[in-house]
Structure formats: structure tokens, C-alpha cells
Amino acid sequence: MAAELHVVVGAGPVGATVAHKLARDGRRVRLVTRSGSGPEHPLIQRVAADASDVSALTTIAKRATVIYNCANPGTYPQWKRVWPPLASSILRAAESSGAVLVTLGNLYGYGPVTEPMTREMPLRPSDPKGALRARMWEEALASHEAGRVRATEARASDYIGPTAPARSSVLAFYANATLADRVAWVFADPDQPHAWTAVSDIAATLIALGSDHRAWGSPWLVPSSAPISTREVLRQLARIAGAGEPRLRRIPRGLLHAGGIFLPTMRELAGVLYQFDAPFAVDARATTETFGVAATAWRKVLSRTAPIWRERALVSRTT
């Protein structure tokens, strides 16, 4: 087990959790970020490098068993420029090393849906970000089918969990206001049922996919919560954390579109708000039945998350 080398690209909430879980299981980890940051552990080697540099990443990933693409290029307006060379470099490194490529994906590629999403559902992206993520998977799949790499992808919904930063999902962003007993200005309907994905479950799914040949050549959905509205999740978090009743004010969609003329991030955000215009559900039974990865009990997710998010919210209120 210790002879395995697992290369993790990105040390955000998911990448850091993947690295820590692997190291805790006795596996050697090489964690790649621009700054060399990440969790400390005797089995984690933190490497400062630009993962979009094919030559550098190929050298770093030499003899790797699995490469986990947990990178996050930053704000939405940066995706078009940063993602293509980054994804291409990671794919080339996997091809060169013979490592399994496991990519952290999302649900944008499905576009607006009228039924629970499944791994077999065709990709029908409705905005450029979804189209970009779909193209990344199609390129990895083409390489897999050509025999150049073994590739798979884990697709997650909006994050929840103690390590999820305030800007990692709309829920975390809103909670940073409501758990500080402030008004949260929300971008979409807070009463539509929505699936939420625990960061720890994303990491568990990625690791499972990297070690099981049945995963390769296909995408898999990360087991997530039953659909529950944004308002109700915020209420439950507030109840556990000892905060007041969440106060939500919705920003009119027309105002968001108007703001997008001047603010690129606002324009890009508006393109994925369809996820909150109707019920947004995930059917990940195939993942659970095949790999034994199940969603963490919702009560446990909330109890772990609420006190950490409450503390963070109170700190941000005073700074």
C-alpha cells in the first residue's frame, strides 16, 4: 500500500480532504498547488508547481498510481482561460504516467433538468461553464476509449461541510450571513428543493473511483442529500448553531442580469441559477450499489458543519 503514489492536484476543500484521507490510509500523496500549500502529514509531500505546465506536471506525476484532478481555477470569468490548458496538462500527465485519472466534476453539464440526475443522463449544457466541463469529460473519455488513459469522473452538487469556504457554494455564502444573524441576499428561489453534497463524501467517491476498474470509462454521481430547500437548510444550521431565524431577501433576476453587464462574475453566476428554479435532485444509487459509498447521514453533516460555519460567520461580521 505504501508503495502507491497518489497525485492530488489542488488543495481546496476536496483536494485537501482527499490527500488527508489517502495519507491516513497509509498511502503516499504528492499534493500539487501553485503555493505548495495543503495539510501536513508525514505521507503528504506538498509540491509548489503550475499544474498547467505539462512538462512540470509530467515529471511530478511520474510513476503515479492515480491522479486526482481537484483543481479550481478560481472565479467563473477565469474558467475559459485557465481550465483548458490545466485540464489538458493533467490529462497528458495521466497518459504519460499510466496513472488512473479521476476528475472532480459538477452537475453543470446536465443543464436544466425535470427529473433526478443519473450517471446515464445525457449532457445538455445550457451555459458556457457547463459546456466547458462537458468538453473536458469528452476529451478524457476519448483518450480512455483510445487506450491512452484510464479515466473517470465524480460529479457533485453544491458543497456542504465544515471545510467548505464561504465562497465554495451559494449555501456557504448565504450561511456566512445568516449564521451571523444578518440578512442574506439570495440569487434565486430559496424554497426550491435542492441536493447538497458533503465534502467528505466527494473525497470518498473520488478515492473509490480511483481504485476500482469498474469506475473507469464512465462518470459517476456523488451520493448527496435528499432535495431540501436552501431556506430549510439554513434554518437547520441556525438551530444547531444557536443563531436566529434566517432572514432572506431575494435579488430580482432582472437586476442580476443588469449587473452582469458590468460584473463578469454576476453574469456567469446568472447562467447556472436554473439549478434553483426547479427541484434539483441527484440519483446516485449506482455509485452506492457499485462502490459502497453512501451519503453521510444528513444530521451528522449538519452537526459537523453548523458550529464551524457559525464561528466563521461571527468572525467575518467583526472584520
Image (cartoon, rainbow, N blue to C red):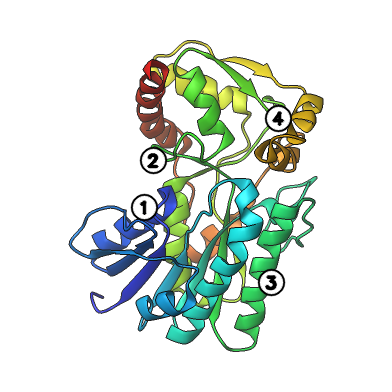
Which residue occupies 49% across, 58% down? 71
Name the spot of residue 23 as percent of width and height, x first.
26, 62
Disc 4 target residue:
192
Tell me the SS state at disc 3.
helix
| Left or right: 121, with 180 as reference point | right
Q: Is residue 167 above or below residue 122?
A: above
Amino acid type indicated by mark 4 = Gln
Amino acid type indicated by mark 1 = Thr
For marks 3 and 4, give the one nearer the viewer. 3
Name the spot of residue 39 as percent of width and height, x first.
28, 52
Whether the residues at callouts 4 and 1 have beta carbons within 8 Å, the answer is no
Disc 3 target residue:
138
| Left or right: 158, with 199 as reference point | right
Disc 1 target residue:
17
Q: Is residue 292 visible?
A: no
Of pointers 1 and 3, the one earlier in the residue sequence: 1
| Mark 1 to mark 2 CA distance (whole Å) | 9 Å
Of pointers 3 and 2, the one earlier in the residue sequence: 3
Q: Is residue 70 visible?
A: yes
Tell me the SS state at disc 2.
loop
Disc 2 target residue:
163
For marks 4 and 1, give the one nearer the viewer. 1
Of pointers 3 and 4, the one earlier in the residue sequence: 3
Between 105 and 34, which is closer to the camera in this rendering? Answer: 34
Q: Is residue 275 above or below residue 294?
A: above
Q: Quadrant of the N terminus?
A: bottom left
Whether the residues at callouts 1 and 2 have beta carbons within 8 Å, the answer is yes
Of pointers 4 and 1, the one earlier in the residue sequence: 1
| Left or right: 296, with 36 as reference point | right
Between 159 and 312, which is closer to the camera in this rendering? Answer: 312
| Mark 4 to mark 1 CA distance (whole Å) | 29 Å
| Left or right: 285, with 263 as reference point | left
